[in-house]
Amino acid sequence: MTLPGVGRGTLGRHSRAHTTEGRTTGAQVPSGPVGQLHLTATLSAAAPYQRQRGRRGPGLVLRAPDLRTAVHEGREQNLVLFVVDASGSMGARQRMGAVKGAVLALLRDAYQRRDKVGLVTFRGNEAELVLPPTSSVEAGVARMSALTVGGRSPLAAGLVLAGRVLSRERLKDPHRRALVVLVTDGRATGTGHPLEDAYRAGRMLAGSGGYALVVDCEDGPVRLGLCAKVAAHLQAPCVRLGELQSTALANLVRAVRTPGAVA
């Protein structure tokens, strides 16, 4: 999993980030105490002012404004939050089986790469945080073994809960970047105006930070194309998979590189 751009998260082994170690990519004026000095940039900043500073003889006359610190680029930790339709729509059991395998595969990967993986499901009248963000494979196995499917598709509730989870995680670690993987056929059921509510929730999630990817698992002879509309409100790419396989979904998440970022 490699997220777009360069973050500032805790040291890890995945997405690019400005870190305190790693390869040097540039220099900057320090905003606080001087860390690792970038010698070449410091000397370059001081060189034009040597005559007016009264330099006589070898060496350069340095002043505090000349100091530059090194900018490093390394790798950071990330959070992958699955938001999965567990309703009774066609293919729900097959979809859930694929997602279970993908989350477990990512948990094993997260253990090695210091990432977190979480799982939100929505069915009936509500959404549930089945797997709070964790890097524990054992916790993932225990939480997902009892997953059930059936009932309505409260898509808006799933997106709202995902936003809350991201907000809580940002309080714990403000610099950890997140990827929301929405797995759905795009249908939304419930009282009132469920589809409009889902679009509204998608726009709210798009402004809450992180990145998103929509996996369209609509099947059957009649396709409504609702996932593309949900993805548009999420400002996220939409990928159609006729038959989800756990390894394919896990690889898709690992390889996501998209400028269509949330926030």
Image: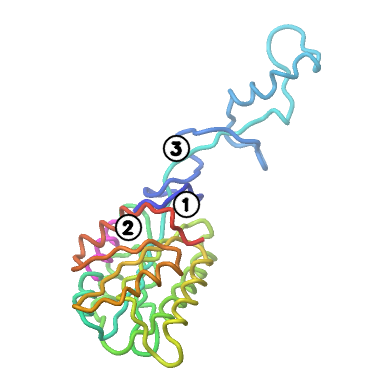
How far across and how far down the image is residue 68, in percent? 63, 31
Residue furthest to the bottom: 191
68 in relation to 165, above or below: above
Q: Residue at x 36, y 72 (%)?
A: 83
User: For the magenta stretch, what is the residue range?
Assistant: 100-109
30 in relation to 158, above or below: above
Tell whether 129 sits left or right of 10.
left
Instruction: Compare marks 1 and 3 and give the one earlier in the sequence.
Output: 1
Residue at disc 1, secondary structure: loop
In this figure, which colouring scheme has been used for the structure? rainbow
| Type of the residue with mark 3 | Gly
Q: Is residue 135 magenta?
A: no
| Type of the residue with mark 1 | Thr
The residue beneath circle 2 is 110
| Type of the residue with mark 2 | Ala
- The dot on residue 22 is 3
Q: Residues within 10 Å of mark 1 (few under 14, many from 20)?
A: many
Q: What is the spatial separation of the Cα atoms under label 2 and label 1, in whole angstroms?
A: 14 Å
Instruction: Compare marks 2 and 3 and give the one earlier in the sequence.
Output: 3
Residue at disc 3, secondary structure: loop
Q: What is the spatial separation of the Cα atoms under label 1 and label 3, in whole angstroms?
A: 13 Å
Q: Quadrant of the N terminus?
A: bottom left
122 vs 10, nearest the viewer: 122
Tell whether 95 sits left or right of 234.
left
Q: Residues within 10 Å of mark 3 (few under 14, many from 20)?
A: some
Q: What is the spatial separation of the Cα atoms under label 2 and label 3, in whole angstroms?
A: 21 Å
151 in relation to 250, above or below: below
Magenta span dominant secondary structure: helix
Residue 221, picture quadrant: bottom left
- The dot on residue 10 is 1
